[in-house]
C-alpha cells in the first residue's frame, strides 16, 4: 500500500526511527512504527465501524 502523508510526518518518522534504533528500542523500523500506530488507532476506533 502507498499513502500520502503530510510533509512533516516522514522527516519526523525518520528521526524517531533513528533515535529508537540507537537506543535499541522496539519498534525502531519505520514500517513497524507506522504499523503499531495504525493498529492502536484501529483498536481505538473499531467501535465506529
Image (cartoon, rainbow, N blue to C red):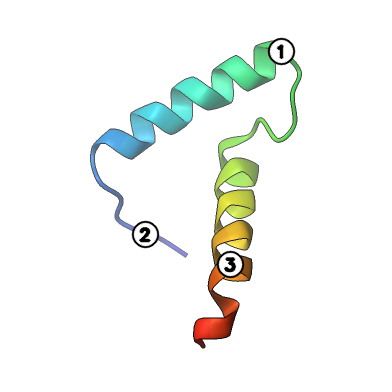
Tag 2 near tag 1, CB within 8 Å: no
**Which numbered circle lies on residue 3?**
2
Q: Nearer the viewer, mark 2 or mark 3?
A: 3
**48, 20: nearer the viewer:** 48
Q: Position of residue 33 (x, y in %)?
A: 60, 42
Which residue is found at the position 65% from the left and 44% from the top?
32
Under circle 3, the secondary element is helix
The single residue placed furthest to the top in the displayed view is: 22
Q: Position of residue 39 (x, y in %)?
A: 63, 61
Instruction: First in sequence, mark 2 or 1: give its number.
Output: 2
Quarter of image, res 21: top right
Mark 1 lies on residue: 23
Which residue is found at the position 67% from the left and 11% from the top?
22
17 in relation to 9, above or below: above
Q: How many marks?
A: 3
**9, 1: nearer the viewer:** 9
Under circle 2, the secondary element is loop
Which residue is found at the position 54% from the left and 62% from the top?
41
Alpha carbon separation for disc pair 2 and 3: 21 Å
Alpha carbon separation for disc pair 2 and 1: 28 Å
Mark 3, Cα crowd under 10 Å, few <14 / some 14-19 / many 20+, is few
Instruction: First in sequence, mark 3 or 1: give its number.
Output: 1
Mark 2, Cα crowd under 10 Å, few <14 / some 14-19 / many 20+, is few
Instruction: First in sequence, mark 2 or 3: give its number.
Output: 2
Under circle 1, the secondary element is loop
Mark 3 lies on residue: 44
Amino acid at each position: 500500500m502507498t499513502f500520502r502523508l503530510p510533509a512533516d510526518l516522514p522527516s519526523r518518522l525518520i528521526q524517531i526511527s533513528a533515535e529508537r534504533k540507537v537506543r535499541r528500542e522496539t519498534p525502531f523500523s519505520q514500517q513497524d512504527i507506522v504499523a503499531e500506530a495504525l493498529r492502536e488507532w484501529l483498536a481505538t476506533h473499531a467501535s465506529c465501524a
